[in-house]
Amino acid sequence: MYVRHLQVNDFRSWSHADLSLDPGITVLVGANGQGKTNLVEAIGYVATLGSHRVSSDAPLVRDGANRAVVRAAVVNGGRELLVELEITAGKANRARINRGAAGKPRDVLGILRTVLFAPEDLSIVRGDPGERRRFMDELLVARSPKYAGVRSDYERVLRQRSALLKSAGAARKGGGKADVRTLEVWDGHLARFGAELLAGRLALVSALGPHVTRAYASVAATDEATAPSGRVADLRYRSSLGESLPAGYGEPGREQPAHDEMVAALESALLAELEQVRPQEIERGVSLVGPHRDDLELLLGDLPTKGYASHGESWSFVLALRLASYHLLTDDGAEPVLILDDVFAELDRRRRARLAELVADAEQVLVTAAVPEDVPEELTGVRFDVREGEVHRAE
């Protein structure tokens, strides 16, 4: 899989940019603020319908413009598809495939897969649980686009149920009677969509874990099993169900039950736990059980990376997560495009060399750097110079 052509109009700082790309390694070099990251951000948006830098679409539209347009020609297995996304701040976005009729942006998910490395990734290790949930859910959707709808449905139900709890809690604190007649209905919706999302996450963690262990060892330049400190990198899913989560679910490397069986068991567990915590939820006015309360624990040996790992170990774990994602998606049958956005400037020389060695043979690697010297020799390929609102292929 690779992107053959990229065109953007009124996207971020670019009024217009047009790039013809090749398989292999492409390096975009430009000083900070020249727009090189904006170009790979556009490619990432085609794959995920989101940005790795901002949480909403409004900043993606160039200041003074009404809309942004991103077009990407994606080649996969000898077949080329043209994806066009129209981004309008405050309004519904639109998508076209092969210049067909406008449809929903979600229709393009799965056409392009990317794995993006960026300095912001350090927040996966050091940030709050929301960063790790986002990492899991984005990879989950990349593997199976149907989960974009499941995630959207769950978030919609969660908002409505939380609003009901908040109003019931306020009524009780004011001396009135909490109206929870519809709460059981929302419990059912939350459990149904929550079980689907949770089952997907648990299967993902089980499949991803062994890749993370191997990738961490590779980045750390040791044998396959251990880190320099002798500690093995591993994952553990922390569910708000606690001990009610069926044994073995989400355990890395362990064969998981059939999807429907897992969903049914999780839905029952969620319903039981919701009934158990209902008094506390009404009192606090928040939903206390569900995938929105879960976390992905990142471990080196028996210790969590957050709070215990050194800066270098944290970066090694981040790189391992991204490399593991790349290998997992490749195992699924579609090798993703690798994007390395200003990441080499953040790494020491040893990790820089190891990462370059590990990704050099990918079908397409897109690298951004402030200066050519930041890019390891293993990743020298086609180069574009980005400066003063223009991008030119270097001779």
Image: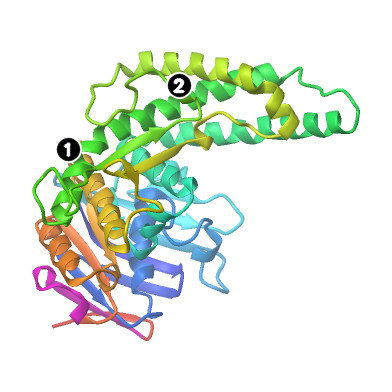
Q: Amino acid at mark 1?
A: Asp
- Residue 324 in percent (x, y) is at 22, 45
Give the secondary structure at mark 1.
Answer: helix
Asked if residue 268 lies left or right of residue 229, the reply is: right
Q: Residue at x 35, y 68 (%)?
A: 39
Q: Residue at x 16, y 44 (%)?
A: 214
**Residue 378 lies in the magenta stretch:** yes
Q: Which residue is mark 2?
A: 243
Give the farthest residue toward the bottom: 388
Location of residue 37 with respect to 74 vertically, above or below = below
The quarter holding residue 79 reads top left
- Residue 206 in percent (x, y) is at 28, 31
The quarter in which the C terminus is drawn is bottom left
Location of residue 85 with respect to 185 vertically, above or below = below
Name the residue nearer the viewer: 161 or 142.
Answer: 161
Q: Amino acid at mark 2?
A: Glu
Of tags 1 and 2, which is closer to the observer?
A: 2
Name the residue nearer the viewer: 86 or 303.
Answer: 303
In the image, which residues are magenta?
A: 373-387
Contact, mark 1 vs mark 2 (Cβ under 8 Å):
no
Q: Report the Cα–Cα distance between label 1 and label 2.
A: 32 Å
Disc sitting over residue 59 in the figure: none
Q: Is residue 70 visible?
A: yes
Asked if residue 47 lies left or right of residue 23, the reply is: right
Badge 1: residue crowd in 10 Å (few <14, some 14–19, many ≥20): few
Work out whether mark 1 precedes mark 2 in sequence or the reverse, and give the earlier one. 2
Q: Which residue is mark 1?
A: 331
- Residue 161 in percent (x, y) is at 67, 29
